[in-house]
Amino acid sequence: MKKFLLGAVLLLSAGALGMQAEPKPLKLFLSPASNIPAADVLKNLSDKCPNVSITLDSKKSDFMVDARWVGRYEFTVFRHGGDAVYSTQTSFLHNAVKDVCHYINSHQP
């Protein structure tokens, strides 16, 4: 009986660990001042953050991202409403997108 209970507890624990909540779908608005093409940002977003899409309507966005190349990639994230909440600088576009993805998924509105 003890072996059965131990097995049931282990099975339930393993199932609970495997059932992680799906990230909420989020929308980003790419700032008009950005000099990185939306297609490049979107390609990396779809790899790193499948729950995030780019919208052309700033009113429907959860966050705005200012994405610039100035000898390195500089991304600044603004919460809907205009408050700057996160910034990253990296040498590679995929790292900047990964950093932004991690931030917005851990600080959802």
Image: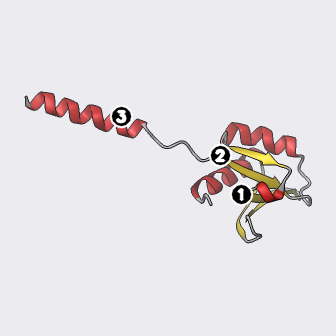
Q: Is residue 5 left or right of residue 25?
A: left
How far from the left and from the top, in percent, is residue 59? 80, 59
- Could you tell me if the residues under marks 3 and 2 are in contact, i.e. CB atoms within 8 Å? no
Q: Is residue 61 above or below residue 15?
A: below
Question: Which type of secondary structure does the marked residue at label 2 adopt?
Answer: loop
Q: Nearer the viewer, mark 3 or mark 1?
A: 1
Residue flagged by tag 2: what amino acid is it? Answer: Pro
Give the residue at the far front of this rendering. 59
Mark 3 or mark 2: whose residue is earlier in sequence: 3
How far from the left and from the top, in percent, is residue 66? 83, 60
Residue flagged by tag 3: what amino acid is it? Answer: Gly
For image coordinates 15% across by 33% down, the residue present is 5
Instruction: Give the Cα separation between the discs numbered 3 and 2.
Output: 24 Å
Q: Nearer the viewer, mark 3 or mark 2?
A: 2
Instruction: Give the Cα separation between the discs numbered 3 and 1.
Output: 32 Å
For image coordinates 22% across by 36% down, the residue present is 9
Pointer 2 residue: 25
Dot 2 crowding, Cα within 10 Å, few <14, some 14–19, many 20+: few
Pointer 3 residue: 15
Out of 94 and 79, give the one closest to the viewer: 79
Kindly identify which numbered label has been placed on residue 62.
1
For image coordinates 77% across by 55% down, the residue present is 60
Mark 3 or mark 1: whose residue is earlier in sequence: 3
Instruction: Give the Cα separation between the discs numbered 1 and 2.
Output: 10 Å
